[in-house]
Amino acid sequence: MKITALLVLKVNPDGSDPVILSNASDVSHFGYFQRSSVKEFIVFVGRTVAKRTPPGQRQSVQHEEYKVHSYNRNGLCALGFMDDHYPVRSAFSLLNQILDEYHKSFGDSWRSAQADNTQPWPYLNEALTKFQDPAEADKLLKIQRELDETKIILVSIQPSILSSLLICLVHMNGCLSQHKTIDSVLARGEKLDSLVDKSSDLSAASQMFYKQAKKTNQCCTLL
Amino acid sequence: MADIAHAEGESFGLLQELEHILESDPLIDEIGFIHPTQLAALNGEVDVDSLSEPVSLNFFSKDHKLGISTQILFPLYEQAKKAFFDVVTRYKIQGGIFDSPNTRDELEVGVMKHSKALLLLSADLGTAWNSRRAIALEKDALSTYMDELRLSELILSYSAKSDQAWSHRRWVIKRIAGKVPNLQEILRKESELVEKIAERSKMNYRAWNHRCWLVSYMTAGEVLYELKKSKAWAGLHVADSSCFHYRRRLMMRILEAFCSRNASASNKSNEIYETWKELAWNEILIKRYIGREALWLYRRFLSLHWLRHFTMEPDSVSCKSKHTANTSDDGPSIFLDNELHLFSSCSTIPDNDFDDFQAQAMHSATYILWLAKQLPRPQAIELREKLNIGDMKALLSKLCPQRSFLWDSLEG
């Protein structure tokens, strides 16, 4: 499976939690009992990453064999949870396409959204299936000058710090690649453990999976 | 069960509950250890009136899925361990001689029942697996062997890398190999099982190792079928080096068939054609997925495999020429030129670094250097002449300065 989930969120300039506008996930390849937790984690990670994606920026977050790609275009943010080797360029051209389609279908109505939307959006579910093979996403690729102007540098985090959820931010526009630890990436004194604890997106069961995975450091972690 | 509780005067309630569930649903195919709140939520979704028994606080069982509350795991394990070791000790003490068939049956049933429960909690307990094998050997019945396959599949559902579970499957297959008419179908299912597990459990060397082992039981026709069938999956999982290792195994098996005295001309041209197709496909993947080491490693195997054809009998070469329309002398040169072309296209690093072009350049450079070392002298010289070693040194030093001692030793 190349793409596990595609999300569209509204990112508020005031820094409050982003609102989920659309969510298409395929958790069928996870174990029966893990599926509900995986869905919760997708929502949690999606919100956490989108919140830290400033407008006009693209980011890629690396965790073991998965990457979460995020693109915030004027407050409307598209996210993709993809396999580590899904070509980055293809991923962002897909996210671009998703934002275009969202505008076409819903215009600017999203600006007034206050609560998470649970209605499925058929286009996103179809995209999830269609673009499993990156070759399909490559066909979307037009010469996009804005993509070429930005540099995306992937940063990964020392495994000793996190085993079940790593977030690394990506800086753009001419920066040389810098290796940042999660502490310098999360704002002023935030720790991922406490984010997980406080999050209302994660049930007790999911938090248990997270802590277990940290302790045992197994390859069969959740996300 | 009642006799155990009575004899020891201890409570084996949890174990009894578990074993009851296992007995009433022999088709359970997945197990999970779940948080009590999740268990409560799952039980809450069940239609209580449709149940024949009250909802359990400790177990969830529906649609052939078994969930065990993490709260009771430790006491349950203790109970299972005690029950199992008690019965297996009694079984072994008999030394194969039993008072009556009933005693033997009772003990065998006890061992099988308790070892099953115990293995669900502790997948790698060798004693438990061994006792199951001992009894299965005694019974030597196909149904018992199939039960063993089902149990190990259940255990793999939560412990996909368990060495004991995988080797148990191999033991069963070896036992039934000569005795079942539908071995090929069983092998095919094994192969599909590995693929299903590899989808969930990435970088699972043991699973792929198992699949490689199956190849020795396959005919040449089946190997070709496997090669075709697993290609699409491999193309979408390019990080999984074990998957390409499996393809390597399949190709080697085809080569064995090719080299055997009974090999027909069609077998030979098949083999050549397959190698050529793999090479072309590998190149497409390399260009699509930038900087994936597994693809380059696979290419090393394929290149040698391909070049080997040119040192073989002339009639094999004439088969090849149907596809490449070259004389035997030009064959290696054409191939090497292609590899050089691939290398030079991969070693240009564009300005934007969306993808890992540096890794790609690194892999292509080391690949071409490695290839040069594998070639017989005349071709090696030809290749090195076409490569500009000086430029290559500069490129490698820039990409990977920490290994400069290696690049410096390249003969310029």
Image (cartoon, rainbow, N blue to C red):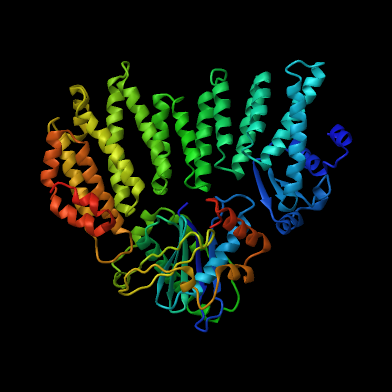
Res. B277 visible in picture = no
The spot of residue B177 in percent (x, y) is 54, 21
Image quadrant containing the N terminus of chain B: top right
The spot of residue B328 in percent (x, y) is 14, 30
- Is B410 drawn above or below residue B277 in the view shown? below
Tell me: A214 left or right of A131. right
Front residue of this view, candidates B380 and B336: B380
- Is A168 drawn above or below residue B311 in the view shown? below
Front residue of this view, candidates A53 and A127: A53
- Is A200 drawn above or below residue A84 in the view shown? below
Tell me: A8 left or right of B282. right
Tell me: B137 left or right of B204. right
In this view, which residue lies farthest toward the front? Answer: B405
Res. A27 image quadrant: bottom right
Total numbered circles: 0
The spot of residue B151 in percent (x, y) is 64, 35
Residue ID at (13%, 50%):
B388
Residue ID at (14%, 48%):
B387
Res. B147 visible in picture = yes
Front residue of this view, candidates A104 and B184: B184
Residue ID at (28%, 25%):
B268
In this view, which residue lies farthest toward the bottom? Answer: A14
